Image (cartoon, rainbow, N blue to C red):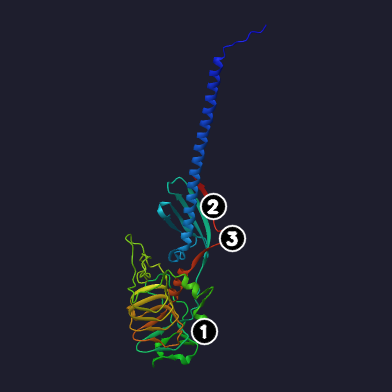
């Protein structure tokens, strides 16, 4: 005969202990999983932030392509780049390396704000140089009048102190669609070149509106100095506290007179949407004027000048030369372009070439916008 035990109080205790162990295990597992998910989410956030900062570095490098330095690098030479994201979201650094005459590689590493993650991206960049057809020291579509001691020369002359510049091929002093448009003021020798005056019936609106693959609107959209409301701006180089070139100064158009200056390699594209008067200062690059350009007294410009309206220049800057490079004046209203006083226009292939090269922009290769080099967190 089987005997049953009626007292089962010890079993309840055992069940309770087992239940506590199971629930505790579940709680520990839940907390651990939550902590892991939180850490994973944090790491993912750091990685995303680092990636965004790196993309920002690439975008800013492309948007602010500094042709004054990068376009003049030797093959396999590299220069550093750096920057930071808004509101302390992170920072980036890297370099721009030239692989060939037309190809560059931009290498950027971005770091998250807490430094917990890094992303490194690279992109291939093709240089798109600016090509302005320069056939003379001064090209114009309308009447041109020279008087006083004003002179126009197409004899190639490098600017003083500019290294690696050699005279190449002399250009025409003056290029016009019809010789009858020229009034030399009784001084044929004041216009010199090869030939002194070139008659070119092909000169038309497109001569002043089309520049290789670019038109006037595209070229003006590339301007880094634009929207001038200043009358007779005091154009001169300016520098930051650390001695670097202050490219943010609207009146800083580079420093052609001091080759050792940090602004010597700065060749901005300057756009005036109306008339522009210049009486003092010095600049370099490409000057685009939608209206008339009136230059007097002590002003010098090195590079390319394109004027949609009328050019009027008189007086004389240092060395009595207002322009070194080349000038194109469309003379839209068909009024006289005037070269008077001691004003001179001197052709310089070196000033033209440097202005064009500096204005060249980098464009990412379409086949691969960027490639990921590494990421860490």
Q: Earlier in the sequence, mark 3 or mark 1?
A: 1
Q: Residue at x 59, y 11 (%)?
A: 6
- Is residue 56 depicted above or below 328 in this figure? above
Farthest residue toward the front? 6
What residue sits right under mark 1 in the picture? 204
x%, y% of residue 26?
Answer: 54, 30
Residue 77 seen by the camera: no
Which one is nearer the viewer's eye here, 276 or 79? Answer: 276
Residue hosting label 2:
372
Instruction: Tell me which label, 2 or 3, sits earlier in the chain.
Output: 3
Residue 37 in sight from this viewpoint: yes
Q: Earlier in the sequence, mark 2 or mark 1?
A: 1
Q: Residue 351, image x and y in percent? A: 43, 74
Q: Residue 231 vs residue 60: left or right?
A: left
State which quadrant residue 297 falls in: bottom left
Which image quadrant is residue 341 in?
A: bottom left
**Kind of element beneath mark 1:** loop
Which of the numbered marks, if any, corresponds to residue 367? 3
Q: Using a 10 Å C-alpha cutoff, classify the residue at mark 1 as few (fewer than 14 neighbours), some (14 to 19) or many (20 or more).
A: some
């Amino acid at each position: 005969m089987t005997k049953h035990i009626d007292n089962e109080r010890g079993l309840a205790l055992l069940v309770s202990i087992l239940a506590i162990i199971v629930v505790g295990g579940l709680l520990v597992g839940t907390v651990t999983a939550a902590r892991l998910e939180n850490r994973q989410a944090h790491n993912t956030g750091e990685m995303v932030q680092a990636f965004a900062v790196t993309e920002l570095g690439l975008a800013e490098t492309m948007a602010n392509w500094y042709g004054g330095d990068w376009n003049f690098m030797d093959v396999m030479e590299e220069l550093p780049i750096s920057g930071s994201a808004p509101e302390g979201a992170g920072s980036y650094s890297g370099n721009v390396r030239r692989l060939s005459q037309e190809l560059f590689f931009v290498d950027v590493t971005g770091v998250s704000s807490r430094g917990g993650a890094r992303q490194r991206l690279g992109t291939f960049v093709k240089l798109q140089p600016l090509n302005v057809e320069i056939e003379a020291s001064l090209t114009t579509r309308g009447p041109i009048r020279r008087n006083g001691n004003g002179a126009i020369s197409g004899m190639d002359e490098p600017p003083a102190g500019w290294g690696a510049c050699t005279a190449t091929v002399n250009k025409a002093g003056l290029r016009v669609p019809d010789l009858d448009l020229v009034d030399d003021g009784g001084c044929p020798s004041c216009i010199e070149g090869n030939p002194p005056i070139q008659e070119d019936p092909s000169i038309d609106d497109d001569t002043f509106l089309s520049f290789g693959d670019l038109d006037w609107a595209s070229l003006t959209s590339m301007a880094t100095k634009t929207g001038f409301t200043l009358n007779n701006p005091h154009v001169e180089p300016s520098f930051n506290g650390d001695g670097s070139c202050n490219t943010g100064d609207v009146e800083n158009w580079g420093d052609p007179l001091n080759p050792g200056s940090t602004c010597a390699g700065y060749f901005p594209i300057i756009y005036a949407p109306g008339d522009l008067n210049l009486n003092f200062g010095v600049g370099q690059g490409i000057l685009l004027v939608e209206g008339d350009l009136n230059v007097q007294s002590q002003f010098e410009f090195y590079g390319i000048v394109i004027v949609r309206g009328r050019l009027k220049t008189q007086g004389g800057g240092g060395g009595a030369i207002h322009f070194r490079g080349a000038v194109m004046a469309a003379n839209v209203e068909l009024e006289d372009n005037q070269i008077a006083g001691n004003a001179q226009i001197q052709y310089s292939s070196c000033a033209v070439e440097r202005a064009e090269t500096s204005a060249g922009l980098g464009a990412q290769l379409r086949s691969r916008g960027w490639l990921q080099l590494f990421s860490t967190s």
